[in-house]
Image (cartoon, helix red, strand yellow):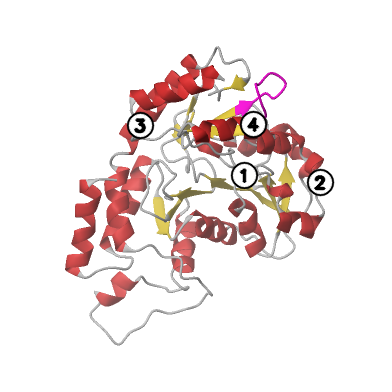
Amino acid sequence: MGEEEWLAVKEPIQNGWLTQGPKVKQFEDLFAEMHQVKKALAVSNCTTALHLALLACGVGEGDEVIVPAFTWVATANAVLYCGATPVFIDIDINTFNLDLRQLKDKLTPRTKAIIPVHLFGLCADVEYIKKNFPRLKIVEDGACAAGASLHGRPAGSLGDIGCFSFHPRKSVTCGEGGMLTTNDEAIAAHLDMLRNHGASISEEQRHHGAKPYLLAAFDVIGFNYRMTDLQGAVGLVQLKKLQGFIEERNRWARYYTDQLQEVGWLRTPAVPEGYTHGWQSYVTFVDESKSPGTRNEIMEILQQKGISTRPGTHAVHMLGAYVEKYGFKPEDFPGAFAADQYSMAIPLHNRMSKEDFDYIIRALKSL
């Protein structure tokens, strides 16, 4: 964030259009262009994007949705919001994404959709899912993946609907916010209504119309999941910087990987051929059979040195609400369990200097 974002907020404040309006529309249009889709629709956050995407795919009571066991809890929660059941699948510990070799065994006649998560900015193999399981609706959880791609195709254009986040930990942010992407005009129209209480026309259309006594028709039950023009103005500025942000993060990710090769107990993230990583986070894996301490002990030592780290994310099947509801055990999904216990994200963002990166590298080597 900087001066440009600060100045961008002034325009909607000065012109008085604060809720979803012209700035959100500009933000959507640029996002759609950059991610090579016909439509992008801004919403309040990625969780609401996931909820709407599943509803637009017809997910409801009695349906099942395939979800990775290692992801942020919102991925699975969105399935429950629809009255459906999340069916967990383990991850490939090398990529932290879905282990698609297990997918066939998880399918039942009730399986309606799958949510491949592009975790930490690395695209899941949506091409494999489309080729081998064409009946499944695909909702991409691209919360971390703005600017990422698979074989030249951007995240958000790979499945039926893509969902993105603009939380401050993401590559571009407007504080909070989300985006839906699709190439299906009918789905886009349905999503547009659902995010705005089910209204048949937007607030902007209504206020600019010639008949002020007319209200929108409400033929479906919708939600108030809109983005404000304040957020849209900031997001628009941020989005214009996305390519530069990604290039810088890629450069420093390669630097980390090169410099940390000699740290034998720390596995650095791999990027398969044909993938462009979005690098929302640089998530390593601590091999405790070789490391000088446990993952948690290492994180505490780094914290004392002024280096903030975090687990990559959590294994959803180990969270209290899901254990209580479904009776999961940690060992039910061993890859997700291992990632939960041994992953470690080290700092990577666009305000770090070479001195910062070198300090972190020296600290890890000194252990």
The residue lying at 33 percent from left, 84 percent from top is: 214
Residue bearing the label numbered 2? 329
Residue bearing the label numbered 4? 295
Q: CA distance from mark 4 to mark 3?
A: 24 Å
Q: Quadrant of residue 338?
A: top right
Q: CA distance from mark 1 to mark 4?
A: 19 Å
For label 3, count other residues whose C-alpha is less than 10 Å away and answer few (under 14), some (14-19) or many (20+). few
- Kind of residue at disc 4: Arg
Which mark lies nearer to you, 4 or 3?
Answer: 4
Which of the image's four quarters has the N terminus?
A: top left
The residue lying at 43 percent from left, 74 percent from top is: 199
- x, y (%) of residue 270? 55, 23
Is residue 322 located in the magenta-colored stretch of the structure?
no
As helix, strand or loop, the secondary structure at mark 3 comes to: loop
Per the picture, the main secondary structure of the magenta-coloured stretch is loop
- x, y (%) of residue 188? 45, 58
Residue 204 appears in view: yes
Furthest residue in direction top, as rendered: 262
Residue bearing the label numbered 3? 352
